[in-house]
Amino acid sequence: MVDFALTFGIALAGSLAVGALGAFLLHVSRRRSVTVAVCVLLAVTVLAMLVGVLGAAWKMFLSPHDLNVLLIVLAAAGAVSLAIAIWLGRRLTADATWAAEARERERRLDASRRELVAWVSHDLRTPLAGLRAMAEALEDGVVADPVTVAEYHRRIRGETDRMASLVDDLFELSRINAGALRLAVADVPLGDVVSDAVASAVPVADAKRVRLVAAPGAWPTVRGGEPEVSRIIANLLRNAIRHTPPDGTVTVSGGRDERGAWLAVTDGCGGIPEADLPRVFDVAFRGQSARTPEEARPGDGAPAAGGGGLGLAIVRGLVLAHDGAVAVANVDGGCRFVVHLPATA
């Protein structure tokens, strides 16, 4: 009984000593990766068992042969335990990193949703109030002059078109964010799409006295959905025209490089502050302090048809859906948006 108690005491003392050392090491490495923590934990466990067994073996006066066999078994078990610890630690680290990224992504999406709801509520309140006031004035007969009545009708139609465009943008953005966008991938001649988009944007550019130029060159063919590629170009042109002052120039160019096909739209907005460049493609970001806001056209009395702040966010979503990339940089007198899309062979 005495030998049993003594053997137990030696094993317990050795294991407690190693356990205390392990607790200190875990405390020191608490800010390191999960892999390190798991490896330290299992190493301490194996070492504590090894010390306890060796203490008991020393008390039991094992033969050298039996002691060597015991050490070999313990070494094999320790090596397997450490290998499993490294593997489990890496798995746990990867899972923890993925979970942290998922939480951060969900936090950003939730903040973006709240911002979008608040922005839409604010952006629709003013035109709706104006529409209601004009409709009530027409209904109550407050406005009877034919010229004024026609002006009210024109304003109502303009505000309705603006809100319809906003709703369309919201629907497109919701499809992109929900992953419901399905591309009908085909070979799309970029030159033809640019030509159609420029032709559609010319009346808007003329109304603002902005010159729209498509640079000559060999336009490549891209792999993508033709409606989506057309929407990308149209949104970039509309954004460039809106922020370019009268008598300015908007240039569209394209080509091919080592990354595939590229398309660039250069405007005369005067540049964007460096701090705002990373936020240009955010939902509802307008950068009014950095750019020249669109004013009413002289003589028509219409309100400014400012952008809804969704066009560039839609551009980024559509480009990413094509496995492409979009970027913006300041150039002399304005800024340049560059889109890269997959090109055909």
Image (cartoon, rainbow, N blue to C red):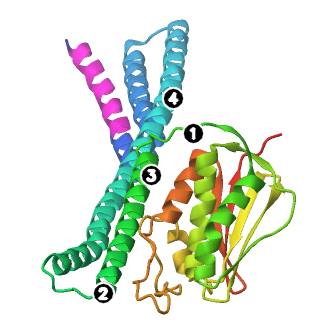
What's the distance in space between the residues labelled 3 and 1, CA to CA?
A: 13 Å
For mark 4, what is the residue?
87
Q: Viewer-nearest of labels 3 and 4? A: 3
- Which numbered disc, 1 or 4, marks the residue that appears first in the sequence? 4
Per the rendered image, the range of residues in magenta is: 2-19
Q: CA distance from mark 3 to mark 4?
A: 44 Å
Q: Would residue 329 appear left or right of 8 to someone viewing this image?
A: right
State the CA–CA distance, disc 4 to disc 2.
78 Å
Q: Are marks 1 and 4 in contact (CB under 8 Å)?
A: no
> Is the residue under label 2 in contact with that under label 4 (CB below 8 Å)?
no
Structural crowding at the residue carrying mark 2, measured as other residues with C-alpha within 10 Å and reported as few (<14), some (14–19) or many (≥20): few
Question: Dot 3 surroundings within 10 Å: few (below 14), some, or many (20 or more)?
Answer: some
**In this rendering, position of residue 269 left or right of residue 293:** right
Residue type, mark 2 in image: Thr
Q: Which mark is residue 183?
A: 1
Q: Which residue is mark 3?
A: 172
Q: Residue at x 87, y 62 (%)?
A: 217
